């Protein structure tokens, strides 16, 4: 019996588990190691913050999926990998051997050289921790303790989350008096999106009086302010952190081949370029020669080929290469039931786009319900 360890309950692994529940790989013991029983679906997080979805609606029951395919569920975090001994070290002090390891453990917002982020800012990831911080922030706002809120990061996550929490806090007493700031090191909002999408959000921000600080990398965060590298000191009762993805730090000492940023380098079969018994998918992986943005869409798309290749590896069968799509549909909401969709140079927007996104997201989540 070969042991397959699935580390992380990310978007690709939930699809692996769903497929293994339909067709169990023969002669294999599957172990799922992830810190929480449930895994959040980030696409619905802004809608949850706006108040449109209950907490349960945005979480996938990973432990339930594991049970459905007869896998052992271990509630722990992988803290290290000894790739030559084929063991993973867990944060509860135990070690687990593997014949095949698959990593789908995501990423966390990059803090760069900024000081005080861990102590004073609320990072968007891990999402379960962010949601605890959000509840505290909501309580403070409802008690009138919030006058200025700053979001650091002008990508889709920062933009959407700022607009969503603003929408929710406008319903709190005194919420309309809160001043909102978005601080980005880029020269514009949504730098990875087409210019037409950028223009829509520039005008949404202007109409709502949200102040955008462009080309302003943050040097430090304090309890009641943030300071940019250019010397701007911005008072803030709460600072949220949503900058680009960074890899888990422990990967550096695993011996696995990594890309320049420290993500696991994989080939077209989703296998480590240095260790053929290690697979990786989602944000934690970068495909050699085919890099893609660290976004959920690509993690979701890797689920089916990952499931196929893990089953093939367990059976000693040949692996099938996979080519990620060049462009993906991007859907960004404005805090209300309104969204902007783009793909390449195409853009559409409206309340109907939000309803379309809602349909896509609910259909995705329905796949993983028991
Ligand atoms: C607010 C927000 C909105 C977003 N909206 C979108 C969107 O609309 N569309 C889109 O395409 N992308 C979106 N993204 C990006 C998206 O969240 C990520 O690209 C996506 O979650 C990556 O999926 P993943 O499977 O790599 O990892 P994740 O979904 O992050 O899952 C990682 C899993 O691994 C577990 N884990 C973490 N560390 C360990 C460890 N050491 N050991 C074991 N388990 C571990 C976690 O608990 C989790 O279960 C958004 C991100 C944010 C922050």
Image (tube, rainbow, N blue to C red):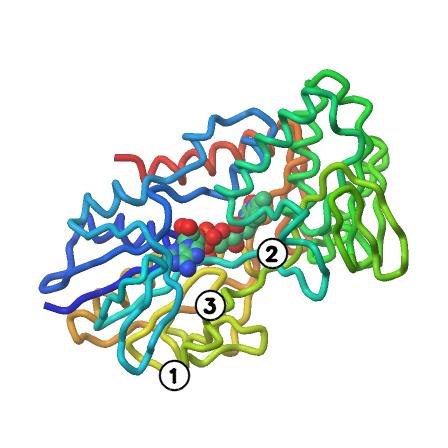
Q: For mark 2, what is the residue?
A: 109
Q: Say which residue appears at 37% left-offset and 62% top-offset.
A: 78
Q: Position of residue 337 (x, y in %)?
A: 62, 27
- Label 1: how many Cα within 10 Å (few below 14, some 14–19, many 20+): some
* Label 2 CB less than 8 angstroms from ligand 1: yes
Residue 313 vs 56, above or below: the answer is: below
CB atoms at circles 3 and 2 under 8 Å apart? no
Q: For mark 3, what is the residue?
A: 285
Out of 89 and 11, give the one closest to the viewer: 89
Q: Position of residue 61 (x, y in %)?
A: 32, 39
Residue 290 vs 70, above or below: the answer is: below
**Mark 2 or mark 1, which is nearer the start of the sequence?**
2
| Quarter containing the N terminus | bottom left
Q: Secondary structure at mark 1?
A: loop
Q: Secondary structure at mark 3?
A: strand
Which quadrant of the view contains residue 302?
bottom left
Residue 209 seen from this side: yes
**Mark 1 or mark 3, which is nearer the start of the sequence?**
1
* Label 3 CB less than 8 angstroms from ligand 1: yes
- Label 3: how many Cα within 10 Å (few below 14, some 14–19, many 20+): many
Q: Say which residue appears at 33% left-offset and 62% top-offset.
A: 90
Q: Position of residue 159 (x, y in %)?
A: 70, 43
**Mark 2 or mark 3, which is nearer the start of the sequence?**
2
Out of 235 and 351, give the one closest to the viewer: 235
Q: Secondary structure at mark 2?
A: strand
* Circle on res. 274: 1
């Amino acid at each position: 019996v070969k042991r397959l360890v699935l580390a992380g309950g990310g978007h690709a692994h939930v699809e692996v588990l769903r497929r293994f529940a339909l067709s169990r790989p023969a002669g294999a013991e599957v172990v799922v190691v992830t810190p929480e029983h449930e895994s959040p679906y980030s696409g619905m997080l802004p809608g949850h913050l706006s108040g449109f979805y209950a907490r349960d609606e945005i979480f996938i029951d990973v432990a339930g999926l594991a049970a459905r395919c007869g896998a052992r569920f271990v509630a722990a975090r992988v803290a290290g990998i000894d790739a030559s001994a084929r063991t993973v070290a867990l944060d509860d002090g135990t070690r687990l051997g593997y014949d095949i390891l698959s990593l789908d453990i995501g990423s966390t917002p990059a803090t760069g050289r900024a000081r005080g982020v861990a102590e004073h800012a609320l990072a968007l990831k891990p999402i379960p921790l962010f949601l605890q911080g959000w509840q505290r922030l909501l309580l403070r706002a409802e008690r009138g303790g919030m006058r200025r809120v700053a979001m650091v990061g002008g990508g889709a996550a920062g933009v959407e989350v700022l607009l969503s929490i603003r929408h929710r806090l406008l319903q709190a007493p005194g919420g309309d008096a809160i001043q909102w700031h978005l601080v980005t090191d880029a020269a514009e909002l949504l730098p990875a999106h087409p210019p037409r999408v950028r223009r829509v959000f520039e005008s949404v921000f202007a109409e709502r009086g949200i102040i955008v600080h462009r080309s302003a990398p943050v040097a430090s965060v304090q309890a009641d302010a943030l300071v940019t590298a250019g010397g701007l000191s911005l008072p803030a009762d709460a600072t949220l952190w949503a900058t680009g993805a960074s890899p888990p730090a422990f990967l550096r000492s695993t011996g696995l081949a990594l890309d320049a940023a420290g993500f696991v380098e994989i080939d077209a079969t989703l296998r480590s370029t240095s260790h053929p018994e290690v697979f990786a998918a989602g944000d934690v992986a970068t495909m050699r020669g085919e890099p893609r943005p660290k976004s959920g869409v690509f993690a979701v798309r890797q689920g089916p080929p990952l499931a196929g290749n893990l089953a093939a590896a367990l059976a000693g069968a040949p692996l099938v290469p996979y080519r990620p799509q060049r462009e993906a549909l991007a859907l960004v909401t404005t805090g209300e039931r309104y969204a902007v969709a783009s793909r390449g140079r195409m853009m559409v927007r409206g309340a109907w786009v939000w309803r379309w996104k809602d349909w896509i997201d609910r259909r995705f989540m329905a796949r993983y319900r028991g």
